[in-house]
Amino acid sequence: MFPPKLLYICLVVCVLLAGCQAQVDAPKIYLSALKPLPERPESAVIPLRVSVAAVISPKGTAESYQPLLDYLSHSLARPVELVQRRTYAETNDLIEAGYVDLAFVCTSAYIIGHDAFDMQLLVAPQVNGQVVYYSYLIVPSESAAQGIEDLRGKTFAFTDPMSNTGRAYPAHLVQQLGSTPERFFARTFYTYSHDDAIRAVADGLADGAAVDSLVYEFALARDPRLAQRLKVIHRSPPFGIPPVVVSPHIRPQLRARLQEVLLGMSAHPQGQIALKSLGFDTFVAIDDSAYQSARELIRKDQGQKP
Amino acid sequence: MNWDIGPTLLQTVLQRWMARFWRIAGAVNIRIKIMGIVLGLVLLLGFAVTVQVSQLLAQNMYLQLQEQGISIARDLAARATDLILINDLYGLRQLIRDTQINHSGVRYAFVVGNDLYILAHTFEGGFPEGLLNANQVTGEAYAHTEILQTDEGQLWDIAVPIFEGRAGVARVGMSDVQAVQIVNIVTGQLLLTTVLVSAIGITAAMTLTWVLTRPIIGLVGAARKVEQGDFSPHVPVWANDEVGELALAFNAMTAALAKNQEERAEREQLRAQYVNRVIAAQEEERKRIARELHDSTSQTLTSLLIGFRTLSDTNDPAEMRQRADDLRSVAANILDEVHSLALQLRPSVLDDLGLPEAIKRHVAECQKHHAINIDLAFTGFDDHRLPAPLETALYRITQEALTNIIRHAEAETASIFIERTVDKVLAIIEDDGKGFDPEQVGQEGHLGLYGIRERAELLSGRLVIESQIGAGTSLYVEIPINGISKG
């Protein structure tokens, strides 16, 4: 038999060892020993870069365009990368530089891009059987405003400085009243996307805003509660729908292939799902003449801006 | 191992520990014991509370740290989404820097793109090796926490997917430095409190022990003096508690002991006197017998001898008969005298006829020689004799009492009443004499009463004296019958 003291010592040592073991598990990370980050390697496969103008917020764009990107990737057997930027101008710069191959741009961005660096029309989406859209003048549902003239001295939300429906058209309306937006409204601000402008009015942040009719209808379809908080007090004449464009640097074969894929989308089940996610019926071929009315409006606004 | 020896081994160990405990606990005085108890309790409580509170606090702080980290990382992920989607790397860098600056517990923050390359981080001039892959999270998860062991201690690394992982992952490292600091501060304060309370406890314990032990120490000193025969110490009663009661009882005890001692000394003195008197009385009795024999019996025997001589000289038968008759009467006288002498020495009547009869005869004898009227009454005496020592004692007590009355009381009447009950005998002897002060009994000159008391107490009985100067005396003697065997 062991002497009892020896037993105690054994017991204590065992307990201590068990305690130590629990402490030592994960390897140590040295926060003070910093090493340079690895360089991002050039990808062997160059993806098709698709840009979507910031008509709606980046997250909303990423969500709704994902099925389309997947469809393109599948059809072209090539990875597709979504490139987003805060403003229309940044997107246009990327298209001009040839960094972006395919782009979903705003009508005004197309007109400016086309006139500046030969941004090329590829196709246009058809929505509810039409290839036109409008600028809606929206106010909170409880507002007494009947038209743009009632918004004098109020807060107005613009979407993007380059936007047709969100900036050029309301500016045109103000000009018709013999004023400029900066004088007419007490305060103006840019939301850089149409859904944010809708939200700004719905939340009472702005007393009014002019938004893309497509985005407005789509937003109301997604969130019917918005209909109770907003009302449209004015609709513009029709404008050419925001088109799908390609960079002037794109190879003609790719351009043809892209046109083919987009025009044939509605014939494929996956393509239909992608179109539905965007609220489009299909894609159709379109001519630059469809954008003439918008072009005049924008030229006026661009020329007037300080 | 043989499990049967388990309990035995345990018992042995327990016994050894108990013995050791008693050796230590027994060796120290109460002062240290009480201080040990108080200090032990305070320290035990203090340390237990400290350990418990700091553990709970640490747990709570770590939980909070983790929750805070998750909320920071989720906020970062939500704000980073659009910045990543529009490739605003400068805005992203600013965002994570702001995240680190505005949240004190954040050690680092970084954002990993969906291609697993770091988009922005808060480290200056590089990135720690192994940190990128130390925590991973799936796109559907809310957040994933990993506790990292680093050179700066434990870090809670929280990973939150950005835009369901499509835009990458936000990572935040929460340092527990602040939590540890708070825990340390609280622990320190608790320990300080424990130390302070211990100090107060020691003071309280010292006061308490002083209060408790002061009377005990006094009692011990007094008890030592009593042991040495000094009954004078009077212990002060400090408080009205158990120790106070002990002090009171102790004082009562010393007082009783002192009184006892005094009484014993007096009685011892009386006993010596009594013995002296008994010896003197014996001598006196011998002298009396010698005188009696010489004066009376010898004289009559001499006259008998002379009578016999003259009888032998006588020839006349008639005269001879006459002289023989005279001689017979002389011899009869001698016989009477010898008989009387023997009777005085030891009343055989007590042995032969019993207590009542013996006392009756003695009373009759007294009345014959002295002018006193004595009433005598017995109750409860039947054919059953009392035990011999009791009869003797009662006889001698009555005799002594009567002798006292005749010699000192100058009484005209006396009465003797003796009652026998089942378990005791009560004798009441009264006179109408001059009386005395009972307080003086026991002093020299009352040896007769002392003798009575001695005899009564030898048989477990007692004597009560009622007397007043000029109002006679009553003696009550009570002796238990069953107490004889003890005597």
Image: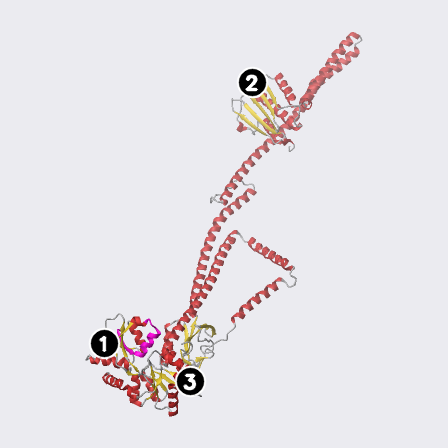
Residue ID for mark 2: B412
Q: Is residue B92 left or right of residue B415?
A: left
Q: Residues within 10 Å of mark 2 (few under 14, many from 20)?
A: some
Q: Residues within 10 Å of mark 3 (few under 14, many from 20)?
A: some
* Image quadrant in which the N terminus of chain B is located: bottom right
Numbered disc 2: secondary structure: loop
Q: CA distance from mark 2 to mark 3?
A: 157 Å
Q: Is residue A137 left or right of residue B381?
A: left
Q: Position of residue A115 (x, y in %)?
A: 29, 89
Q: Position of residue A280 (x, y in %)?
A: 35, 81
Disc ID at residue A73: 3
Residue B322 against residue B424 in the figure, above or below: above
Q: Which is more foreground, mark 2 or mark 1?
A: 1
Instruction: Kindly tell me whether residue B395 is visible in this rendering.
Output: yes
Depth check: give the residue in front, A13 or B141. B141
The magenta segment is A205-225
Determine if marks 2 and 1 fall on one subunit: no
Q: CA distance from mark 2 to mark 1?
A: 155 Å
Residue sitting at x 47%, y 53%: B205
Depth check: give the residue in front, A267 or B411. A267
